[in-house]
Amino acid sequence: MTPRSQTRRHFLALAGALAGVAAARPALAAPLALRLVTEFGVKPGVAADQGRALQKALDTVAISGETLYLPAGIYRTSALKAANGTRLAGAPGASRLVSTGDAVLLSGGDGLVLDGLAFEGGGLSVDRGSGVRIRDCVVTGAPGNAIALTGVAGEVSGCTIARAGKAALFAQDSRGLRIEGNNVDGAADNGILVWRSTPGPDGTLVSGNRISGIGMKSGGSGQYGNGINIFRAGNVIVANNRISGCAYSAVRGNAASNLQVLGNNCSGMGEVAIFVEFGFQGAVVASNIVEDAAVGICITNFKEGGRLAVVQGNLVRNLRTGLPPGNDPGGASGVGIVVEADSAVSGNVVEGAPSAGIRLGYGPYLRDVSITGNVVRNAGIGIGVSLVEGAGSAVIADNLISGARDGAIVGLAWEKPLTGDLLAPGARIDPRLTLNGNRSL
């Protein structure tokens, strides 16, 4: 199919869809219409900056309620500002807006709809907008954040975001946002960020995205290098994403209460694959696959108020040691699953954890943890539990531990062994522990 026929086909399909929307409206409602950008003197393939003519076209359609359509081609432009209600569409992968130097190529607000456009060399910014739709767009080579959303309700779906200079998508203080089915291919610092200025409910849905090649150009000890990072945003769901090749974590929740991390497939992580940390209350980490990371799943920072979690039905395998001390969270390098307070860990399978399959607590930071029905294979220690002064209670029951080189269940002082194997005949069981039905092979 030639670019011209592709453009015409998409133009007709988009016109038909808009006509359907118009037909569904009350009889007195004005029909939706398309305007070609060429009507405003804008031409594809021109070497000069066409920003002034493009801006005039955007202003006109925002007033008229029409959709501005860009036929296939390259449109070089300086920064554009979309008024409330602007709708801009193009032929997917073929209608390309190329920045002539501005870091933000297009900014907008309420009711902004972008469909089937490619933005090159500059990012998108939306501030305090409702009904925002960014669909089937491509954003490549933005020097800063590729897509930056502040106080937005709406969706970013089906987009490809590549080679971002900072984050691929940064959503702050969202008001009902869906981030779904996007492809993030390389970002210097982070993939998808969902943040709030102050802790509180957020409710953003992050699902079905592919994220790979996330670096940590700006350094730090976990602020950068994450596939998906949830910071101070409560009630967020991160589900069914494929995440690979991140300098730090696949999913990192920081002070994010009522976080759900479900069904993600994660591989090739430089630090903790799934990390829930600092002052959160409530997290469910379930049905994820983790392979090739320094730590599999870590639910931590009880001393900062981090508590209340379910870790269920995850598969964690092929972990590695060797993190430098400054980048090793609580000496957990090579551990499959780490939990500290008010948590249930059940039905997980951990294989190939050189330090420990499951570790409960760190020093005195252990309270009311239940570890039941898990399978641990080929680990250093099968299950390690903190038994220093001040550590709380734990139930360890009905777990199958196979090939634990340094003991099936071992008491710890911080990350160091304090006891022998507690499943060995005649072993003294600390009164803070309940051990029942565990089997060591």
Image: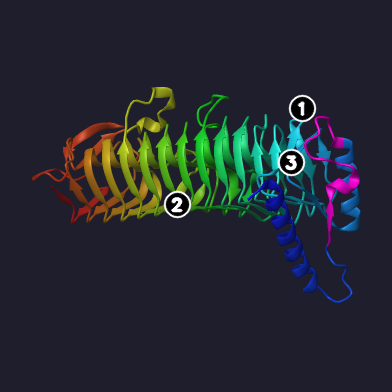
Kind of residue at disc 2: Leu
| Image position, residue 76 (x, y; %) | 78, 34
The colour scheme used to paint the residues is rainbow
Q: Which residues are magenta?
A: 33-51
| Alpha carbon separation for disc pair 3 and 2 | 53 Å
Q: Earlier in the sequence, mark 3 or mark 1?
A: 3
| Image position, residue 441 (x, y; %) | 13, 47
Determine the secondary structure under disc 1.
loop
Residue 270 visible in the shown view: yes
| Image position, residue 147 (x, y; %) | 68, 41
Q: Which residue is mark 2?
A: 308
Q: Which residue is mark 1?
A: 101
Residue 308 versus residue 120: which sits nearer the camera? 120
Numbered label attached to residue 168: none
| Alpha carbon separation for disc pair 3 and 1 | 19 Å
Q: To which quarter of the image does residue 417 belong?
A: top left
